[in-house]
Image: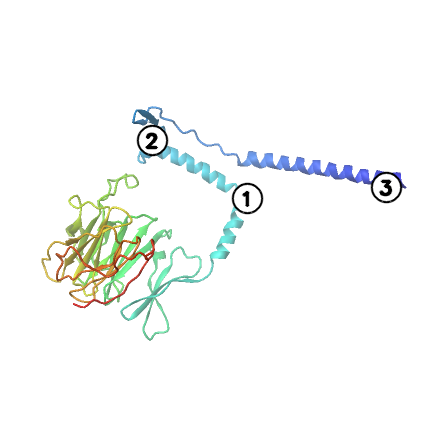
């Protein structure tokens, strides 16, 4: 009995070992098959051994510099071949459709944005689930049903043209909205009558990194760069930002340059009209932190040039509740920085009143929103 039991255990071990060998062999076979099926054959990329620079006596090769020329035939051919390799690989993924179906099921639910008020209307964005672009609706005070205001899904057949921002006049009668085609930073601006939803005036083109700020119903301020020459939109420099004023129902070619350009070279320039439409606030900077501040009285025709108030290490938001005072809401990012106010009646002052004196208890990188009133 003992011998039989020993033989039985031995046979179980042998069979178990053989099954493991068979399983490992099958896995290796599958892995080899999968590896051969998904092996990627990348196209050869030409190395230009003559390209490079010399820094402090040391030559630094740059063999793929030729690919920086995005308009060359050679670069175009290389991109087409690389795209084909990528698409061929994606089509062979067996669970790709399952993944697509799962993502669709996760994304397929109603989504709403935060609402915002313009005059007598509440505006909000809504996506039914799988729409390429969210739709802008509005609802009048006292009404229970919302009406469709703008549907970006109708901007193009492919659904790749998006609503990239909208700004209304204070009474909500006119709206200027930006569209982005295929995700481009170069945008178009279209003005519509908010009641009839009909376009007013021509479409502005080649607007980049810009807000829109209305002055009454007359027109609005916007920013842009000089457009790179045709064929170099991706690689051409857009370095000097300009602030323009567009008067409604006039061609874009006649828009007035307000600030910026070679005489005032800044990478980023923006303009904002005060709530009482008395002041134009201009911010300008060469990086994403820190700015210079200009203010211009636009309440009368023939306004003088903007008055420079240097605030190179601040980021400011402005409100103009009166004709003589503006309020600054700033970010404290250093223990030695301060909050200031100035009266527009004395724009020549170089030192404002310190509302937040140096305090050793201030902490670096503290964001401090401040809302306060200042007597005239």
C-alpha span from label 3 to label 2: 75 Å
The mark closer to the camera, 3 or 2, is 3
Q: Position of residue 283 (x, y in %)?
A: 22, 53
C-alpha span from label 3 to label 1: 48 Å
Say if 168 sits above or below 267 in the image. Answer: below
Query: Tags 3 and 1 in contact by the CB under 8 Å rule?
Result: no
The image quadrant of residue 307 is: bottom left
Q: How is the image coloured?
A: rainbow
In what element is the residue under mark 2? helix
> Extreme front residue here?
360
Of labels 3 and 1, earlier in sequence is 3
Dividing the image into 4 quarters, which one contains the N terminus? top right
Closest to the observer: 135 or 121?
121
Closest to the observer: 83 or 5?
5
Closest to the observer: 7 or 96?
7
Say if 274 sits above or below 268 in the image. Answer: below
Which residue is drawn at the image coordinates 52% and 41% (left, top)? 92
The image quadrant of residue 337 is: bottom left
Going by the image, does 24 lie left or right of 271? right
Of labels 3 and 2, earlier in sequence is 3
Neighbour class for label 3 at 10 Å: few (<14), some, many (≥20)? few
Going by the image, does 132 lie left or right of 32? left
Q: What residue does disc 2 label?
A: 65
Q: What residue does disc 1 label?
A: 94
> Extreme right residue here?
1
Neighbour class for label 1 at 10 Å: few (<14), some, many (≥20)? few
The mark closer to the camera, 3 or 1, is 3
Total numbered badges shown on the rendered structure: 3
Of labels 2 and 1, earlier in sequence is 2
- Label number found at residue 5: 3
Q: Position of residue 340 (x, y in %)?
A: 22, 59
């Amino acid at each position: 009995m003992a011998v039989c039991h020993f033989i039985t255990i031995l046979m179980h071990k042998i069979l178990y070992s053989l099954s493991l060998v068979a399983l490992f062999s099958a896995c290796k076979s599958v892995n080899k098959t999968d590896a051969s099926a998904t092996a990627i054959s990348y196209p050869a990329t030409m190395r230009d051994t003559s390209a490079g620079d010399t820094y402090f006596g040391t030559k630094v090769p740059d063999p793929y510099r030729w690919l920086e020329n995005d308009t060359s035939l050679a670069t175009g051919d290389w991109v087409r071949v690389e795209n084909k390799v990528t698409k061929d690989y994606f089509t062979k993924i067996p669970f790709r459709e399952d993944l697509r179906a799962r993502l669709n099921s996760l994304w397929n639910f109603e989504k709403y944005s935060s609402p915002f008020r313009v005059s007598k209307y509440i505006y909000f964005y809504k996506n039914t689930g799988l729409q390429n672009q969210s739709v802008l609706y509005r609802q009048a005070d006292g009404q229970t049903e919302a009406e469709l205001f703008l549907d970006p899904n109708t901007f193009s057949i492919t659904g790749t043209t998006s609503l990239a921002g909208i700004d209304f006049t204070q009474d909500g009668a006119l709206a200027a909205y930006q569209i982005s085609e295929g995700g481009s930073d170069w945008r178009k601006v279209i003005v519509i009558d908010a009641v009839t939803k009909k376009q007013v005036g021509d479409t502005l083109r080649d607007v980049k990194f810009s807000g829109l700020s209305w002055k009454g119903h007359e027109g609005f301020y916007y920013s842009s760069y000089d457009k790179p020459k045709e064929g170099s939109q991706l690689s051409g420099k857009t370095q000097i930002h300009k602030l323009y004023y567009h008067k409604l129902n006039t061609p874009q070619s006649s828009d007035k340059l307000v600030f910026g350009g070679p005489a005032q070279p800044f990478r980023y320039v923006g303009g904002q009209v005060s709530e009482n439409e008395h002041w134009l606030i201009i911010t300008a900077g060469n990086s994403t932190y820190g700015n210079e501040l200009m203010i211009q009285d636009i309440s009368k025709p023939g306004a003088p040039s903007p008055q420079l108030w240097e605030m190179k290490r601040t980021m400011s938001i402005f409100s103009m509740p009166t004709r003589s005072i503006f309020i600054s809401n700033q970010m404290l990012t250093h223990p030695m920085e301060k909050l200031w106010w100035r009266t527009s009646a004395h724009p020549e002052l170089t030192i404002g009143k310190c509302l937040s004196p140096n305090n050793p208890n201030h902490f670096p990188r503290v964001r401090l929103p401040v809302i306060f009133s200042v007597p005239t």
